[in-house]
Each structure stands twice: as structure tokens, then as C-alpha cells.
Amino acid sequence: MQKVNFQLEGEFVELNQLLKLAGLCDSGGAGKAMVASGVVTVDGKRELRKTAKIRAGQTVVVGDVRIQVGGSATDGA
């Protein structure tokens, strides 16, 4: 399984945008289609909310790619 580490720049990122930023699709619209198809899980549970707020510490899996979401460098400052 391929592992991708993604660092947040704010409090959260919408799921469809995360898929785009992680390079799994070309656009936010394509990310929405991926989520709607039921192939995305967040913390082990299938996620169908296209703009679900993904926060630091969560894990998103699509196929054989695992995205580990980390906090921004300014957390706790």
C-alpha cells in the first residue's frame, strides 16, 4: 500500500479537495465523483459526504493509497 503524508495548512480540508491535493484526481469535481462512488474510507469507515471535513490525525484510504493527515506547522502556536 502506498502511503502519502499530507500536512494541513489550516484546521481542516474538505475530502474532495484532499483527494485532489494528494494527487489522486485532477480536480475537486473528480474527487466528488470518487467519494460518491463509495471507494473512499475515512478512519476505516466508508465516507459518502463529498465535502467532509478532514482534520489532523485522520486517515483516508482510496484503493491501495493511504493518506495520513498531519497538523499544520503553526498548530499550538
Image (spheres, helix red, strand yellow):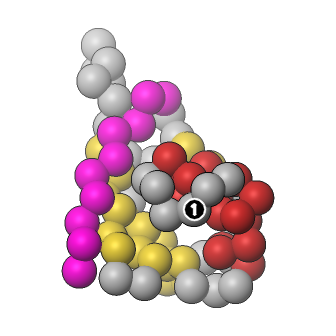
Residue 38 visible somewhere in the drawing: yes
Residue 29 in the image, given as x and y percentages of width and height: 76, 58
Label 1: which secondary element: loop
Q: Report the quarter where the C terminus lies.
A: top left
Residue 1 in the image, given as x and y percentages of width and height: 23, 80
6 relative position to 16: left or right = left
Along the line of sight, the residue nearer the viewer: 32 or 73: 32
The segment highlighted magenta reads: 1-10
At x 67%, y 53%, the residue is 27
Does 8 lie within the magenta span?
A: yes
Along the line of sight, the residue nearer the viewer: 1 or 48: 1
Magenta residues, dominant SS class = strand
Quadrant of the image occupied by residue 33:
bottom right
At x 52%, y 41%, the residue is 12
Residue 9 in the image, given as x and y percentages of width and height: 44, 29
At x 35%, y 74%, the residue is 65
57 relative position to 18: left or right = left
At x 56%, y 53%, the residue is 20
Residue 50 visible somewhere in the drawing: no
60 relative position to 38: left or right = left
Extreme-top residue of the structure: 77
Mark 1 surroundings within 10 Å by alpha-carbon count, few (fewer than 14), some (14 through 19), many (20 or more): some
Q: Amino acid at mark 1?
A: Cys
Residue 26 in the image, given as x and y percentages of width and height: 61, 56
10 relative position to 50: left or right = left
Up-down relation of residue 6 to residue 59 (above or below): above
Label 1 belongs to which residue?
A: 25
Quadrant of the image occupied by residue 71:
top left
